[in-house]
Image (tube, grey):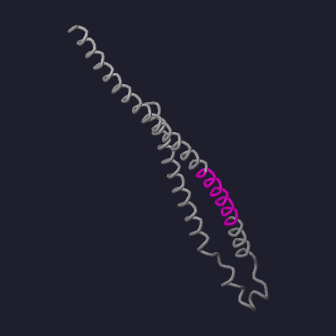
């Protein structure tokens, strides 16, 4: 009879211990699922941001190409104008010295676009680093 009560006490103790362990396991599983869900959300956000950055870089590169062509065209026109012989009308009306000078703000605009491109490249690198870290966390 004493042995039976000891066994019953042990059984109750084991049941209680098993119950606590099961609760701990369930909590750990739910935390893991939450972390995995958060991880997937971050991956999707990073991929979305990377696509957005890629589109912006492509647009900026197109803008830079257009501006470069425009600058080359304008420089050629200025060069052509400076190289031509002055006509009687140019001598009479002043040759349009003020109107046909190249604008300095075009060069500044080009530099601004270059700076924007560099900053977008930096953002893109940071996003790629974040994606790599997130992938490493998922694997770990």
Q: How far across and how far down the image is residue 136, in percent?
A: 45, 34
User: Foreground: 104 or 6?
Assistant: 6
Residue 64 among magenta residues: yes
Q: How far across and how far down the image is residue 135, in percent?
A: 49, 36
Residue lying farthest to the bottom in this orientation:
92
Q: How far across and how far down the image is residue 43, in percent?
A: 53, 42
Q: How far across and how far down the image is residue 28, in percent?
A: 40, 32
Residue 23 among magenta residues: no
- From this view, report whether residue 125 is shown above or below residue 89: above
Count up the numbered dots: 0
Residue at horizontal 57%, vertical 47%? 50
Q: In which quarter of the image is residue 110?
A: bottom right
Location of the C terminus by quadrant is top left
Left or right position of 22 against 8: right
Q: Give the range drawn in magenta.
A: 52-71
User: Foreground: 15 or 27?
Assistant: 15
Left or right position of 6 against 27: left
- From this view, report whether residue 135 is shown above or below residue 87: above
- From this view, report whether residue 84 is shown above or below residue 1: below
Residue lying farthest to the left in this orientation:
2
User: Foreground: 12 or 116?
Assistant: 12
Q: Main secondary structure of the magenta part?
A: helix
Location of the N terminus by quadrant is top left
User: Foreground: 129 or 2?
Assistant: 2
């Amino acid at each position: 009879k004493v042995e039976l009560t000891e066994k019953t006490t042990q059984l109750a103790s084991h049941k209680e211990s098993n119950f606590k362990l099961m609760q701990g396991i369930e909590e750990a599983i739910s935390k893991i699922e939450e972390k995995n869900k958060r991880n997937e959300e971050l991956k999707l956000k990073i991929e979305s941001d990377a696509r957005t950055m890629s589109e912006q870089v492509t647009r900026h590169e197109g803008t830079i190409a257009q501006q470069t062509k425009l600058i080359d065209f304008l420089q050629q026109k200025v060069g052509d104008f400076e190289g031509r012989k002055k006509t009687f009308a140019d001598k009479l009306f002043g040759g349009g010295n003020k109107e046909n000078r190249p604008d300095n703000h075009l060069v500044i605009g080009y530099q601004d676009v270059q700076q924007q491109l560099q900053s977008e490249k930096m953002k893109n690198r940071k996003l790629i680093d974040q994606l790599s870290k997130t992938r490493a966390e998922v694997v770990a």
